[in-house]
Amino acid sequence: MILGLLDEAKANGGRVLPACRVLGIDARTVQRWRCNRGAEDGRRGPQTTPANKLSEGERNEVIEVLTAPEFAGLSPNQVVPQLADMGMYLASEATMYRVLREERLLVHRERSRPRQHRRPKEHVASGPNQVWSWDITYLKSPIRGVFFYLYLILDVWSRKIVGAEVHEAESAEIAAELLDGTYAREGVDRRPLVVHSDNGSPMKGATMVAKMQELGVVPSLSRPHTSDDNAFSEALFRTLKYRPCYPEGAFASLEAARQWVEAFVAWYNCEHLHSGIRFVTAEDRHAGRHREILTRRELVYSKARSRRPDRWTRTTRNWTPIDVVRLNPSPAPATHGVAEAA
């Protein structure tokens, strides 16, 4: 009968695979049937009701026990031993789990439910010193298992490294001092500023929290073990450690690490062209010079196209400035002229 239905569907222009899905049968099974027409259905499966299946009364008793106040907060793995201590056996743990699943009662049954971590709030920057991202990364020292700690603060809108220090310890006190000095040097002066970081102990330490409150900074934290929530800092560290001049082994000393980081910051801010901001330097964008640079590039391309229009099948390259940058953007279609980092 099934083969006849499939032949009819094929004759009417249907395809075999979708038809098999509608009938709930695998296409390979149909192939075997066609090779051995007239044979019996060789599909395996439960043809009869298992003899050891719980009766309706037994099933109701299991549900009644599992939903009773004294057992409602326990898993079947805990219920079964307790029932045994009471001289009772209703069903195995697996059977109880199956009954709970079928009755849509299989939820976390204990009071200590797993903590739910929500996606960090979206932060939008339309200019410098509005949203900063900071983090700490390890730098190898001459002693195996001992590291130097690089503290970096990045301006999300301009991509400029506004604060960087290398220390021998990782602490909230050092982070607070770096934030205080960077805040004063950039002249933020009580303007709205969001500082985003991961969930490390220096980021949530009492000294760092107190310093943010003193400066009027709005703290923002990533979800635990979710590096994408702090994508700007993670991308910066990858750029840093994949530089050709980055030491293959360890830094010879703390002073050597500090000198290397100082040179890297100068290159990153003043020479490196960032793809996410139309290939201008972070320093030019932070200072507002990027618009003039992009306007000149647009003029160069326009003149080139006017000279040889046959070489341009479409419009010229987009040199429009990126006006808005979003940190942890809310799920939404991307808009023109907006840079995002999830």
Image (cartoon, rainbow, N blue to C red):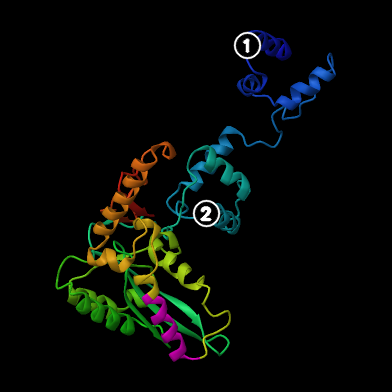
Work out whether residue 268 or residue 63 is closer to the camera in this orientation and state it.
268
| Left or right: 145 as drawn, with respect to 231 | right
Tell me which secondary structure the magenta stretch mostly adopts. Answer: helix
Span colored in magenta: 253-266
Dot 2 surroundings within 10 Å: few (below 14), some, or many (20 or more)?
Answer: some
Q: What residue do we see at 69% from left, 37% from top?
A: 52
Q: Amino acid at mark 1?
A: Gly
Q: Which residue does the numbered mark 1 point to in the structure image?
A: 13
Task: Indicate the quadrant where residue 336 lies.
Answer: top left
Above or below, comparing residue 16 to residue 317 in the picture: above
Task: Indicate the quadrant where residue 49 lies.
Answer: top right
The span from disc 2 to disc 1 (Cα, nearest Å) is 53 Å
Asked if the magenta segment contains residue 317, the reply would be no
Task: Indicate the quadrant where residue 54 lies.
Answer: top right
Q: Which residue does the numbered mark 2 point to in the structure image?
A: 75
Dot 1 surroundings within 10 Å: few (below 14), some, or many (20 or more)?
Answer: few
Q: Horizontal and vertical percent for residue 179?
A: 27, 78
Q: Horizontal and vertical percent for residue 134?
A: 35, 71
